[in-house]
C-alpha cells in the first residue's frame, strides 16, 4: 500500500508541471488571438496616411480579421474534433505567426488586408481549440480555475491591444504591431508542441464526415450578419438591411440543411439542452455589454469628464488590470462553489456594475467610473469562468471542438452587435450626429441611457439563467 501511494504521489508530481505548461501554452494562444482583435485599431489613422487610403478602406484591416474569426470559428472547432485537435491547433499557430510576419512586411494596403484575413483564420483555430483542450488536459476539479485563467487572457488581450499598439507605433512604427506576434507565436508553438497530448488515432470507419455544405452556409450567413453590423460606420442603410435579410435567409437554409445531413456541423438536438442554449444566449448578451465599455466609455471620459488622451488610456487600463487580478481567483471560486451558482453571482455583479456606470460617474466623476468598473469586471470574469465550465464540463470528447467554437462564436457575435447596437444607442441618447464634437451634457446623457440599457440586458441574462436552471434535467453525453 505504501509503495502504491508513493507511486501515485510520484505520478502526480510528474503530471502537475505538465498541466502548468499546457496551461501556459493555451494561455498564450488565447492571449495572442485576442490581442490581434484590438491591436490594429489604434494604428488605423497612421495606416491611412502610410497607404494614402480612406478610412473606409483601412477599416478592412480590422474587419478582415474579425470576419475570418466569425465565419470560421465553429467550422474549425468541428474540424479539430474530426482531424485531431493537437495537429490543427499547431497548424493554426503556424498560420497565425506566418500571417503576422506577412502583415509586418506588407507593401500595400490590400496585401495587409489579405494577410489579416489569414491571421484571423489562424486566430479562429486558436480560440476554438484552446477552450476545447481544457477538457482533454485538466482534471474536472480544476476546470473552473483553467477557464478563469483563459478568460483572463482573453479579456487582457482584447483590452491591452490599443495601449500596447500605441506604444509600439510610437516607438517602432506601424509594422511593429504585427511583428511583435512573431516571436510570441513561436514560443506558443513550442509550448503546444512540447506539452499538449498527442491526438488519439481512430479508425477511419469511426470518424464522422466533415459537413462542407453546412460549413459554407454558416460561413456565408455569419459573414452577412457581421457585415450588416459593421458597414456604414454606424448608420443602418439599404445595404445593412439587405445583408441582415441575407443573414436571416442563410440561417434558415443552414437549419434546413443540418436537419438533413447525416453528420452535421452542428447537431440541432444540442439546443434542446437548456444549459447549452442558455449559456450561448447569456454569453452573447454579456459580450454586448462589455463591448459598450470599450466603445462608449472613451467618449465619456474625454468629452464629459474632460480627461486628456493619456489619462483616458490610463483610466481605461484599470479594467484589464482588474481582469488579470480577478480571473484566476474567480475560476477557483467556481471550482469550490459550483458553476451554476457562480453564473448567477457573476451576472448580479455585472448588473450592479452596469447600473452604477449609468448613475455614479455623473455625481462622482472618474472615481465613480472606477468604482463601477471594480464591480463590473470581476463579475464578468466570474461569469466567463462559470459559464464556460458549465458548458464544457460534460461535453463528449468528440464534440468539444464544435461546442467550444460555438461559445467563442456567441462571444464574438456579442462583441460585433455591441459595437453596432450600443454605439447606436449612445448616439441616439446623446441626440447628436457627431459624438466627437458633442457637448459634455449630451455625452453624459448618452452614457446614462446606454448603461441603463446594458443593465437591462444583464437582467435579461439573469432571467435566462433562472429559466435554464428550472428547465435543466440531468445532462448526458448524448446531448452534446
Image (cartoon, rainbow, N blue to C red):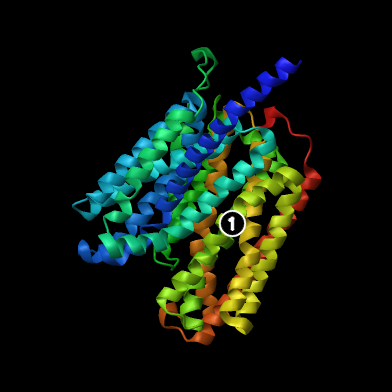
Report the quarter where the C terminus lies: top right
Q: Residue furthest right?
A: 470
365 or 412: which is nearer to us?
365
All told, the count of numbered labels is 1
Nearest the eye: 220 or 62 = 62
Residue 261 screen position, x and y as percent: 54, 27
Residue 373: x percent and y percent?
A: 60, 67
Residue 72 visible in rendering? no
According to the picture, the residue beneath numbered tag 1 turns out to be 325
Q: Quadrant of residue 183?
A: top left
Task: Give the vertical position of 77 relative to 300 (above or below).
Answer: above
**Left or right of residue 470: residue 269:** left
Q: Position of residue 275 (x, y in %)?
A: 70, 42
Q: Residue at image x 64%, y 68%?
A: 354
Please tell me which residue is depicted at 71% across the width and 49% down the height of the picture.
Answer: 333
Q: Secondary structure at mark 1?
A: helix
**Residue closer to the observer: 444 or 240:** 444
Considering only vertical position in the picture, is 82 above or below 369? above
| Residue 80 point in image, percent of width and height | 48, 30
Q: Residue at x 55, y 81 (%)?
A: 444
Amino acid at each position: 500500500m505504501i509503495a502504491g501511494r508513493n507511486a501515485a504521489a510520484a505520478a502526480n508530481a510528474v503530471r502537475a508541471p505538465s498541466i502548468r505548461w499546457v496551461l501556459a501554452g493555451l494561455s498564450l494562444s488565447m492571449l495572442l488571438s485576442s490581442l490581434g482583435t484590438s491591436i490594429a485599431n489604434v494604428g488605423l489613422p497612421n495606416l491611412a496616411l502610410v497607404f494614402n487610403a480612406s478610412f473606409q478602406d483601412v477599416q478592412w484591416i480590422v474587419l478582415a480579421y474579425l470576419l475570418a474569426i466569425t465565419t470560421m470559428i465553429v467550422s474549425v472547432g468541428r474540424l479539430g474534433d474530426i482531424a485531431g485537435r493537437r495537429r490543427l491547433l499547431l497548424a493554426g499557430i503556424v498560420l497565425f505567426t506566418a500571417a503576422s510576419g506577412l502583415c509586418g512586411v506588407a507593401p500595400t494596403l490590400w496585401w495587409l488586408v489579405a494577410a489579416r484575413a489569414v491571421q484571423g483564420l489562424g486566430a479562429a483555430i486558436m480560440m476554438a481549440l484552446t477552450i476545447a483542450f481544457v477538457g482533454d488536459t485538466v482534471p474536472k476539479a480544476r476546470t473552473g480555475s483553467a477557464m478563469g485563467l483563459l478568460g483572463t487572457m482573453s479579456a487582457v488581450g482584447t483590452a491591452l491591444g490599443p495601449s500596447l499598439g500605441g506604444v509600439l507605433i510610437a516607438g517602432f512604427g506601424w509594422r511593429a504591431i504585427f511583428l511583435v506576434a512573431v516571436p510570441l507565436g513561436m514560443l506558443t508553438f513550442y509550448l503546444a508542441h512540447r506539452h499538449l497530448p498527442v491526438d488519439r488515432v481512430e479508425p477511419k470507419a469511426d470518424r464522422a464526415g466533415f459537413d462542407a455544405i453546412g460549413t459554407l452556409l454558416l460561413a456565408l450567413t455569419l459573414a452577412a450578419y457581421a457585415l450588416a453590423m459593421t458597414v456604414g460606420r454606424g448608420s443602418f442603410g439599404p445595404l445593412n438591411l439587405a445583408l441582415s435579410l441575407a443573414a436571416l435567409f442563410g440561417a434558415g437554409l443552414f437549419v434546413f440543411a443540418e436537419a438533413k445531413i447525416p453528420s452535421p456541423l452542428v447537431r440541432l438536438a444540442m439546443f434542446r439542452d437548456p444549459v447549452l442554449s442558455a449559456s450561448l444566449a447569456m454569453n452573447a448578451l454579456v459580450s454586448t455589454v462589455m463591448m459598450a465599455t470599450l466603445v462608449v466609455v472613451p467618449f465619456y471620459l474625454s468629452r464629459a469628464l474632460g480627461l486628456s488622451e493619456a489619462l483616458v488610456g490610463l483610466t481605461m487600463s484599470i479594467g484589464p488590470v482588474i481582469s488579470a487580478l480577478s480571473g484566476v481567483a474567480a475560476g477557483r471560486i467556481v471550482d469550490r462553489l459550483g458553476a451554476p451558482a457562480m453564473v448567477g453571482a457573476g451576472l448580479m455583479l455585472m448588473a450592479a456594475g452596469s447600473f452604477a456606470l449609468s448613475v455614479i460617474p455623473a455625481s462622482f466623476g472618474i472615481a465613480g467610473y472606477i468604482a463601477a468598473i471594480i464591480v463590473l469586471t470581476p463579475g464578468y470574469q466570474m461569469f466567463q469562468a462559470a459559464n464556460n465550465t458549465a458548458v464544457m464540463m460534460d461535453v463528449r470528447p468528440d464534440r468539444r471542438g464544435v461546442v467550444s467554437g460555438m461559445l467563442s462564436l456567441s462571444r464574438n457575435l456579442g462583441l460585433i452587435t455591441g459595437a453596432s447596437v450600443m454605439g447606436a444607442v449612445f448616439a441616439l441618447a446623446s441626440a447628436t450626429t457627431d459624438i466627437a464634437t458633442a457637448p459634455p451634457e449630451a455625452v453624459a446623457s448618452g452614457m446614462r441611457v446606454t448603461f441603463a440599457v446594458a443593465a437591462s440586458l444583464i437582467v435579461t441574462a439573469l432571467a435566462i439563467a433562472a429559466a435554464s436552471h428550472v428547465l435543466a434535467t440531468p445532462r448526458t453525453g448524448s446531448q452534446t
